[in-house]
Image: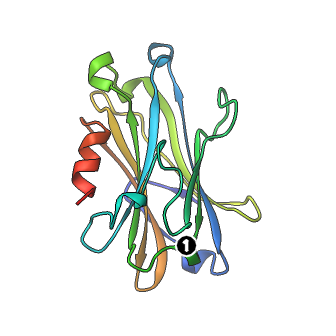
Amino acid sequence: MQLSKGERFNISQEAPDLKKMAIALGWQVTEAGKSYEIDVSAFMLGSDGKIPNDQYFIFYNNLQSSDGSVLQTIPDNNQGKENKTIYGVILERVNPEIVEITFVVTIHEAQKINAKFSNVTKSFIKICNLDTGSELARYELENNFSRETAVEFGRLYRKKGEWRFQAVGEGYQAGLKSFVDKYCS
């Protein structure tokens, strides 16, 4: 299923037997952005909109949540591959306190190197069945980020006991620290 900005996808209804999923994020960098170091982070949030502890902030220095439900991998030899970062999510292991997992992409030291997402194109986030490899939903972001240095691609969340996904596509003039300040207690 192809999603549009803001659209929601009910994973529990569309794939009721899904136990393990892959959340894959990808993009292409233009020639002007070849030097960019792009980071993907997942914030596992409680009902207060904050991470319960630092182990629920999954990024390049912490590749797995403390409950073992979310694991970040970066495919080897990433050049030219569609998937740049993949999160494995085991739904039944997600701590019951966690109600949302937000996926954010930032350009490392963007202000210092004068980097913008206008040089990052063909961005997407997709949900796949980890056991079968079949794609369930995909959101291809529009390339209209002229000044932004960070983008929230999407969010996985629980509502009334069901897992759902929302295509967000919201850009920010901020770095990773801004999101850490927002989501960490």
* Residue plotted at (65% across, 74% down): 18
What percent of the width, then of the height, locates residue 145?
33, 33
What percent of the width, then of the height, locates residue 173?
24, 35
> Height in image: 83 above or below 67?
above
What's the residue at 77%, 63% (across, down)?
132
Q: Amino acid at mark 1?
A: Ile
Task: Say few, some or many: other residues with alpha carbon within 10 Å of mark 1 (under 14 / 14 to 19 / 20 or more).
Answer: many
The mark total stands at 1
**In this rendering, would 23 be left or right of 168?**
right
Quadrant occupied by the N terminus: bottom right
Along the viewing direction, whichever of 155 and 35 lies nearer the viewer: 35
Residue 87, position as x, y percentages in the image: 57, 54
What's the residue at 48%, 49% (across, down)? Answer: 62
Q: Nearer the viewer, residue 167 or 181?
A: 181
Looking at the image, residue 149 lies above or below residue 5: above
**Element at badge 1?**
helix
Q: Give 165 or 150, whichever is nearer the viewer.
A: 150
Colouring used for the render: rainbow
Q: Is residue 12 left or right of residue 76?
A: left
What is the quadrant of residue 69 in the picture?
A: bottom right
Question: Splitting the image into 4 quarters, where does residue 141 fall?
Answer: top left
In the rendered image, the residue lying farthest to the right is 132
Question: Quadrant of residue 171 in the image?
Answer: top left
Quadrant in the picture for the C terminus: bottom left
Q: Is residue 69 left or right of residue 156?
A: right
- Residue 106 relative to residue 81: left or right: left
User: Could you tell me which residue is drawn at 70 percent across and 62 percent down?
Assistant: 130
Residue sticking out furthest to the bottom: 160
Q: Which residue is mark 1?
A: 11
